[in-house]
Amino acid sequence: MSRTRATIKDVAKDAGVSVSTVSYVINNSGPVAPERRERVLESCRKLGYTPNSSARRLRGQFTSTIGLVVPDLVNPFFAMVAEGVEKQASERDVLVVFCAPEAGDNSESVNARLLRSQRLDGVVYLAGAATPLDSLVKLTSLGPVVLVDEQLPGVTFPCVVADNRGGARLVAQHVIDQGHEQIGIIGGPSSLWTAVERLAGYQEAIKEAGIDESKITIVEGDYRMESGKQLAARMLLGSALDRPTALLCANDLMAIGALEYARSVGMTVPTDMSVVGFDDLPIAELLQPRLTTVRQPARDMGYRAAQILLDLIEGSEPEPLEPLPVMLQIRESVASFATTR
C-alpha cells in the first residue's frame, strides 16, 4: 500500500506555522525568520515533502494562474496596481491573466468571460465602476476573490484599500491652511466607495475649519480627465470674486483636466486658482506646475492583494486588513489665498 504524499498543509501543521510561511520558504518568495525557516525545512525532511510544480498543477494543488480585472487601460493608477500584482505573482511562480473591458463592455461581460475560461484559481478585482453584486459573487466559483481600492456592501471578500478619507482630509487641510474658503470639489462617482470616502474626508476638514457650507461647491465626475476639464469649466464661470479659489479633485486625472481647462482660458495655476489631486500618478511631478496630491501606495496595494489571494488559495486565512497609509505630496499647484486674490 503506497504512502500518502505529504501536503503543504501537513508541513505547516508539523512546523507550527502558517501555510503562507511554508510557501515563502519553499519558493524563497518572502521574509521568514531563520528559526521558523529551519523548522519548516526540518518538517519537509521529516515528512518527505518535495515541491513538484508539475505534479501539483496536475493534481490541482498548485496555483498556476490567477485573474486580474482592471476597469480600463487609461488610468495609470490601475497599471501601477497591476505591477504590484505581477510582482507578487512572479515571486510565487504564478501566471496572471489580465482582463479589461473592451469598448462598450461592462463588469458583467468581463466576469462572464472569466467564468467561461474556468482556468483560474482566483481573481484580484480592481473595481472602477459600480459592480453588480451577483456578478461578482459568481466569480467565487473560480476560487477566492480579493478586491482592490474598493469596498462593496454585502460582500465578505478581503479588500485592500488605502486611507482615502484620511488622505482627503490631509490635502483639504493643506488647501484651507493656505487661506482658501471658496472651494470647489470635483468628486468621483458616488457609486464608488473611494469617492464617498474622499468626499467625506474633504467635508470633515472643511467642517473642522468652520467654513460656511455656502462657500463650497460640489460636483460629481467620473475619475476621467475629460470630466475634470468639463466640470472645472462649469465651476469657474462667472467673476473672479464668485468662483472657487481652489479645486479639490478626487483623482489626478480630473485634476489634470482642470489644469488643462485653466490653461485653455488663460488662467494661471496657482496664481489664479489652486488645484490638488489624489493618487500621485508619475505624471504629477512632471506637470507645470507640479501637482500637489495624495500618494496612494498603488503597487503595494496590488502586491498585497495578490499575496492575500495566493495565501487563500493555499489554504491560509488572511489577517485583519487595515487601510494602507497615504502621504500628502506638497508641490507647486497650491498658493496662498492672498496670492490668488
Image: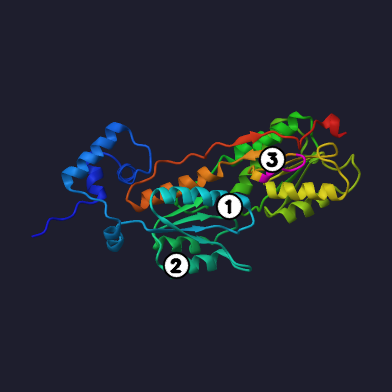
Magenta region, residue range: 283-289
Q: Position of residue 241 (x, y in %)?
A: 90, 39
What is the number of the mark on residue 115?
Answer: 2
Q: Residue at x 86, y 44 (%)?
A: 267
Dot 1: element: helix
What is the number of the mark on residue 78?
Answer: 1
Q: Residue at x 48, y 51 (%)?
A: 86
Tell me the kind of residue under disc 2.
Leu
The crowding category of the residue bearing disc 2, from other C-alpha atoms within 10 Å (few below 14, some 14 to 19, many at least 20), is some
Q: Position of residue 219 (x, y in %)?
A: 74, 50
Q: Is residue 318 left or right of residue 294?
A: left
Query: Looking at this view, is 96 or 316 the one in front?
Result: 96
Compare marks 3 and 1 and give the one earlier in the sequence: 1
Tell me the kind of residue under disc 1.
Phe
Q: Residue at x 24, y 36 (%)?
A: 39
Q: Quick check: can you spot residue 149?
A: no
Q: Is residue 103 left or right of residue 146?
A: right
Q: Is residue 262 left or right of residue 69?
A: right
Compare marks 3 and 2 and give the one earlier in the sequence: 2
Q: Where, by quadrant of the figure, is residue 169 drawn?
A: top right
Q: Position of residue 110 (x, y in %)?
A: 53, 66
The crowding category of the residue bearing disc 3, from other C-alpha atoms within 10 Å (few below 14, some 14 to 19, many at least 20), is some
Toward the bottom, the furthest residue is: 116
